[in-house]
Amino acid sequence: MTTTTTSPSVTPFRVAILFLLISISILHSNKPDQTLSPNPNPQPVPPPPDHNHHNYIIRFVSYKQAQHHKAYLEANVNSSNWQWIDRRNPAAEFPTDFALVSIEGLARGDLIGEFEGLELVKDVHADLSYSRRPLERVGAFVDGKKRPGKIFTAMSFREGESIVAAATSNATISWKRQLLMQKSQITSLFGADKLWSKGYTGAKVKMAIFDTGIRANHPHFRNIKERTNWTNEDTLNDNLGHGTFVAGVIAGEDAECLGFAPDTEIYAFRVFTDAQVSYTSWFLDAFNYAIATNMDVLNLSIGGPDYLDLPFVEKVWELTANNIIMVSAIGNDGPLYGTLNNPADQSDVIGVGGIDYSDHIASFSSRGMSTWEIPHGYGRVKPDVVAYGREIMGSKISTGCKSLSGTSVASPVVAGVVCLLVSVIPETKRKDILNPASMKQALVEGAAKLSGPNMYEQGAGRVDLLESYEILTRYEPRASIFPSVLDYSDCPYSWPFCRQPLYAGAMPVIFNTTILNGMGVIGHVESPPMWHPSDEEGNLLSIHFTYSDVIWPWTGYLAVHMQIKEEGALFSGEIEGNVTLRVFSPPTQGEKDRRSSTCVLQLKLKVVPTPPRSTRVLWDQFHSIKYPPGYIPRDSLDVRNDILDWHGDHLHTNFHIMFNMLREAGYYIETLGSPLTCFDAYQYGTLLLVDLEDEYFAEEIKKLSDDIIHTGLGLAVFAEWYNVDTMVKMRFFDDNTRSWWTPVTGGANVPALNDLLAPFGIGFGDKILNGDFSIDGEQSRYASGTDIVKFPGGGYVHSFPFLDSSESGATQNILISSLTKADSPILGLLEVGGGRIAVYGDSNCLDSSHMVTNCYWLLKKILDFTSKNRRDPVLFSDSVKQDKPLHQEDNQLPSRRTDINFSAYSAVVGKELICRSDSRFEVWGTKGYGIQVRGRNRRLPGYPVIDLGRGLNSTTEASVTKSSKSTDKNTDTSSGSKYLGLFNKDDLDMPVVVASHWIVPAVVATSGQSSLQASCFSVAFGEFDRSDVGGEKDLPRVD
């Protein structure tokens, strides 16, 4: 491996990358010529998860021997309240880029600050723990209590377990018979025997299996090269069977459960204990060892929702940057949307979903989109591909075969395919042709698109081994875009885009694609993307782009922001054309000229005349907060095995069924990922606020009041529970991060909603109500909703007898049979000024995550009222009209918690009000509509001068505020909390250019108390202009 640079100029970003690459070079230069022998010495057992000792990972800016790092810390840290933890594993012989230390709890804050102040220290993170039940479908929480280990997804199902088919499945009994006949022939279904007959069997391919290990001399394997143990247990064996099973799918040679590549060299990394627990530090050492020993392919059948685990995520980037092709399971949290698992959701990793033998998406397979980009952008398409994952045959621990189901089974199916494909390329040419991007190109371009599932269920489709083989045999290094087509006429594959056409005056529709650069680990966008309409009508499309200027490692993003120009307000028809993007990479070793390639994205869009205002609904995404980074609790407290709100709360994730229902009802729903000042209220019938956790700017509260009273905007609010005592009871000590986890807010931020609704005399309380009720024959379940305690006279309020569990501690499993029901107001409807308001205290009936019964019927009645002033006779019965107002003193309303640093998770608190690039193009970088001018007005190319009478204004320039750490340490290669100051940049130029993976996906400020810090990732659009990144055209390269 060599490190090169092609420009004499030096910037902090270039120096950071250079240090990373030099460090990796040192790591490789110190490895022996022969494979290390297995080292069964166990890791030291981490200190118990008490409140006095905490394990932390200290990351350094370069690789050095562990003893060198230890001596450096001992010489430069004065405090004695920490201890070095030796890591006894095979990686100990190699240079490392991190240390593991134990810190005394009382000294934690000061010591972390002291460590981070050292020149050679990159950052400090808690040593997270991964925990799973590979053979059982068990989540991270059981009966409301957190199991030991990191938040994880369920993996494989036990043998013979019955799994309910997905909603899209039409499987029958005959399918079951077919399954029993075919399940042992998984390799034949992909045509592997045709490649075997050509002599391709996975020979000389180094396959790293990160799992529960494997037993020596297993009769199913002919080529177990090395077994290593990275846990604190003194064994190399697999005592659970999952690692052996995975290895069997990849490389088994038993006739009953054949693997794809029987001659593949198996390197078994035992990273899970018999208790199915692992620590981030174990993974970091194991990843480093995989890099040092030149693995070709790595399978990781684990995952979880925490894509902000910086040490883990960045090490995966480093792994793929070193040309290791990683395959990982997308997760078993289906059929819910927004449930992708990390690291499979990373663009440089091949994320695998599961299907059954009838080509239906398995019910357990997690669905997209990715949620890193929410709330300010739009998620990427994942999984990348799908493979058979139901009732797959694989090897048992000692001998014989068994069947398992799950995406952790589908993942090794694809890993086996990858090993077989790698062996097709002559060994002397592999490193020139094969890399994580080129392999993903071969898989997604060769995949067979399934009829029925959409792109966020199946990705490119079912893996096709033989098609991918043909692609690789004629492959020349190039760049491409995935998906390469957005076709509104291709439904349901192009859902949700095909469900709602474009029209003038709408919020931009964002399509977020992935750039795959098979030419090199580092690439650049040569010039801004270009739109090439196929005919004159294509000029009605106003299109902007945000994209990765620096593409690393191997991948980047291109987000297409689409609006129809005002002159297209009456147009009906299709717009077609192509977007082109030219990418280049520096020349590889021995080449003189740089490599370049033109990527093409085909667009076929449906356009309709602008719908009437009364049919247009605006969804507020901006004020939604999710896990990660904060402990955002579940909305229904009846659900005790999934306590975190991590599905994105987006129209196209856990509210996708509601979205489809509203479209069927004739409504057009748009998404706002910017403050409420950034939309024109004259365009919309209703603003829809559902399950929101963030605060509101004062300007938002003022504008919304004016919009409702003076412009006739409707407002529909679906709140959630909020009770401080209950939040305190939900606090727990996490043995993984060795810190207390406390809910940031309730199911919704009721104090913030009350501020927003205060101008109308409306307020929610702090009861937690549960029960069944009926309106006009429609049965519904009220699940952990709140009550209405303030409402003006003259409005209509519906009350029902419910149990209030907030007073009983019922959320802590205390019996509630002794509680008595009392009438509680939960639904209010009011006409105020020219607008109409409806408030309801529960959102679970709209959220498909844990829905008991839906209330779509109620939502439609509410929207008929707020948007069209249609009054349902039952909802507006005289019997529920309030002659007198409901009243409660303001000091009796639910109060905010004072023990939480809410600014660490908020897009409002401590932030600048700014309209981002998911709002209308004409307000990008401004404060929006209806705000007094206090900055320069912007005129965009192709737009007339904005009429300031409508209130469009811009802000003054603001500099990017960076932490002292990133300013002082030019050698810092971290893409994490060092760049959180980028969120303070509030002035934009278009197209906006940033480096891939170097901007933050959600507004997360750094807190000295927080162990959940933001990382920097490839997001849907680049809002933030980095002078030391965006202008870079020549960066170091890894060969």
Image (tube, rainbow, N blue to C red):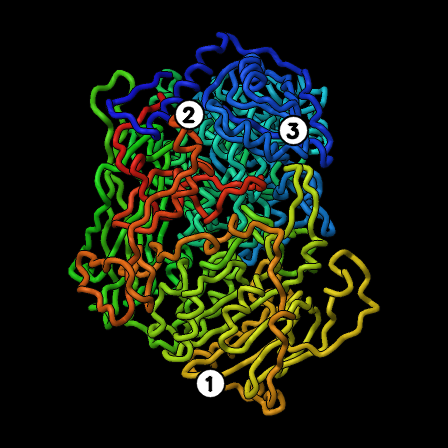
Instruction: Name the residue type under label 1.
Output: Arg
- Most foreground residue, 425 or 40: 40
Q: Which residue is painted at 69% across and 21% down in the image? A: 44
The nearer-to-camera label among 3 and 1 is 3
Neighbour tally class for label 3: few under 14, some 14-19, many 20 plus, Cα within 10 Å: many
Residue 460 screen position, x and y as percent: 41, 45
Which quadrant holds the N terminus?
A: top left
Q: Which residue is mark 3?
A: 103
Looking at the image, residue 979 sits to the left or right of residue 271; the answer is left
The nearer-to-camera label among 2 and 3 is 3
Q: Which residue is mark 2?
A: 323
First in sequence, mark 2 or 3: give its number: 3
- Determine the residue located farthest toward the front in the rendered image: 78
In the displayed structure, would residue 887 be above or below residue 536?
Answer: below
Q: Which residue is mark 1?
A: 870
Residue 366 screen position, x and y as percent: 54, 48
The nearer-to-camera label among 1 and 2 is 1
In the displayed structure, would residue 874 be above or below residue 425?
Answer: below
Which quadrant holds the C terminus?
A: top left
| Circle 3 SS class | strand
Task: Determine contact: label 2, label 3, CB under 8 Å.
Answer: no
Res 498 visible: yes
- Most foreground residue, 697 or 846: 697
| Circle 2 SS class | loop
In the displayed structure, would residue 202 be above or below residue 883?
Answer: above
Disc on res. 24: none
First in sequence, mark 3 or 1: give its number: 3
